[in-house]
Image (tube, rainbow, N blue to C red):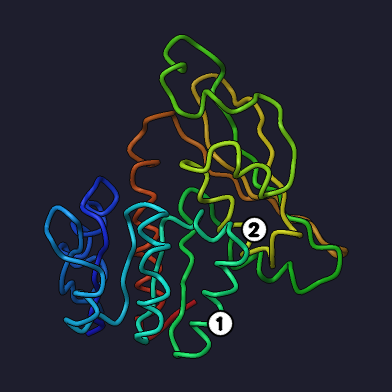
Amino acid sequence: MTKVGIIGTGRLGTLIREALEAGKAPECELIGISSRTLGITPMDLVAKGAQIIVEAAKPEVLKEYLLDILAAGVSVIPLSTGALADEAFLEQVRQTARNHGSKVYLPHGAEGGFDLAATFSLVDGMKGTVVQYLPKRTPEMARNPMAALPEQFHGTALEGFALSPGHLNVVIAAALACGGFENACYETRIAEPGKGGFALELENDWSKATLQLSGKPGSPFFGSIALSAVALLNRITSPISF
């Protein structure tokens, strides 16, 4: 059994904990949860023998502990992938993981198709675009943090992420799956009434592909995207992977 720890006791951390306790990752054993309120640090999870730690807290927590966790030979699945938009920090992460035999595994979150994006990036002309479909503006929409996003935007992945760093972690993860920030863009479009979601559009000199995830704003589907971390745990630990 692979020993797993979780950082964070909020909504996303709770979803992951419940999934592990329900046996959704049968090759994994949950050995502890870290949070400031519990008085347990991520390094306490390392000391308890965690082999993989799932971060479901905040980017600042990830930046505080990620290098130390990796240096201890423990791998990490971060949900706060926006922390990796800091390119100097990203290079430190790469080097630390190389030096200590640990890894950072990126969950797809509200996106998908990272395996296909990585394959596309092996061919010249790679371009990936994260498209966010915004619900049409309504009085109710004003309370949604996505209301601050422009209705029509097209820019680089880093420019897009900067529009709402607290909510666009997926843009950074998708850009890295596409082979790097230079290969990826971010775009907003207005969705059909009552709909919202993301798409990943891929293109290289050989072919094109689009993968779209959509649903009603506030639907349980978008709350359950944290389960992509559990699916990733299964791919890492299963005797048969893909």
* Front position in the image: 63 or 172: 63
Please say if 111 is above or below 138: below
- Name the kind of residue labelled 1 in the image: Gln
- Residue drawn at (69%, 38%), measured in percent from left and top? 187
Q: Residues within 10 Å of mark 1 (few under 14, many from 20)?
A: some
Please say if 193 is above or below 232: above
* Front position in the image: 106 or 90: 90
The image shows residue 136 at horizontal and vertical percentages of: 56, 18
Please say if 2 is above or below 62: below
The image shows residue 174 at horizontal and vertical percentages of: 60, 57
Quadrant of the frame with the N terminus = bottom left
> What number of labels is visible?
2
Element class at badge 2: helix
- Per the rendering, the mark at residue 209 is none
Pointer 1 residue: 95
Pointer 2 residue: 175
- Residue drawn at (68%, 63%), measured in percent from left and top? 178
